[in-house]
Image (spheres, rainbow, N blue to C red):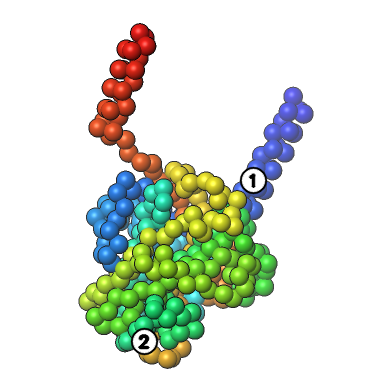
Amino acid sequence: MLKNVVLCVIVLAMLLSTSLVFAHSGGQAKAFFTDVPPVIDGQVDEQYEEHWAEYQAADMHMDPERVPDWFLFDETSPNRVSRGVIEDAEDLSNNFGFLFDEERIYYVGVVKDADLPVDINSGEVQAKGGPVAPNTDQLWLEFDWEHNACRVPRGNDDRDLAQVDCCKPQPGDHWWRLKPWSGPGTTEPVCWWNHGQNAVLGDQHIFDEDCTSNTAATQTDDGFIIEVALNYKEGMENSTIAAQELIDGVVVGFDSTMNDFEDAAEAREGSISWASSFENDNCVCIYGDLQFIGVRAVSPQDKLPMTWGNIKLNARRGL
């Protein structure tokens, strides 16, 4: 009896140890299955609207005035600002949502920006320039498909955490970098991808034609809306889940960062993140989780032809 108790304690300790290693430290974003892909037009599709309350409940926003309980190091990073200065939600903020199906992840971000740059991204798509091209507001969407960053970062604050190995991206990580804004009256987004920065491709950011052609942005009274359909299977090429589908219950690591540029050819004013902190934007060990929820609905109309087909087949067989 005692031996069994000891064995159970050991097993539980091993499970707890595993859970502490292979998980993330931040919050939990959500993506909901969609039977019909949203139209990529730079608008908030009604399918996103149906889940908007759940997105907000999951703290799916980058807003310096709304900081969730799970955000790390609130003394040194109190406002989700990961670089520079972001004064308030009107200066820069982003409320976002995710959908997914068997082929793509769908993202929409409703961005507030008090001072949009002007005509600094023109022609960039055609030139297929890199991130060193003239600056504009930039959105990073970052995924750790392996979900293997440590749960509890080693370090007491941002400065300590910046020195640890778990911050380094791994080959299974995949980042998309989008420049959604070209200037007043124009919506010419451009997108690059990166498999595990400094782990697979060094500092290269590769122009992503598929992502670019599946991205749209529209100007609003106080900022813009950015929408993109991401080919997640391409991002899984260096991951052990490459052969798997994103299905109900799958959880991957996730973070998102936005850079704020207010003047052409000038340095960014600041950056704001979803899970990362001031010294560690894009640090994989303080990613949050992205949980995929739901499966394709099967209607009675979908079932009927197959049902009648089986009935006829069984009748012919004399069953």
Residue pointed to by mark 1 = 16
Q: In the image, is residue 186 above or below residue 314?
A: below
Relative side of 108 to 259, left or right: left
Residue 288 visible, this angle: no
Residue at the left extreme, as displayed = 221
Question: At which x and y percent is residue 244?
Answer: 52, 46
- Please tell me in which quadrant of the rendered image residue 48 appears: bottom left
- Residue ID at (44%, 43%): 248
Relative side of 134 to 316, left or right: right
- Residue ID at (67%, 48%): 17
Q: What element carries label 2?
A: loop
In the rendered image, the quadrant that contains the N terminus is top right
Q: Is mark 1 on a helix, strand or loop?
A: helix
- Residue ID at (62%, 58%): 150
Name the residue nearer the viewer: 186 or 81: 186
The type of residue carrying mark 1 is Leu
Q: Determine which of the numbered discs, if any, sits on residue 152 in the image.
A: none
The type of residue carrying mark 2 is Ile
In the rendered image, the quadrant that contains the C terminus is top left
- Residue ID at (46%, 51%): 291
Residue 106 visible, this angle: yes
Mark 1 or mark 2, which is nearer to you?
2
Name the residue nearer the viewer: 69 or 113: 113
Q: Is tag 1's residue or tag 2's residue first in the polypeptide sequence?
A: 1
Q: In the image, is residue 13 above or below residue 136?
A: above
**Disc 2 residue crowd, few under 14, some 14–19, many 20+, Cα 10 Å:** some
Residue pointed to by mark 2 = 120
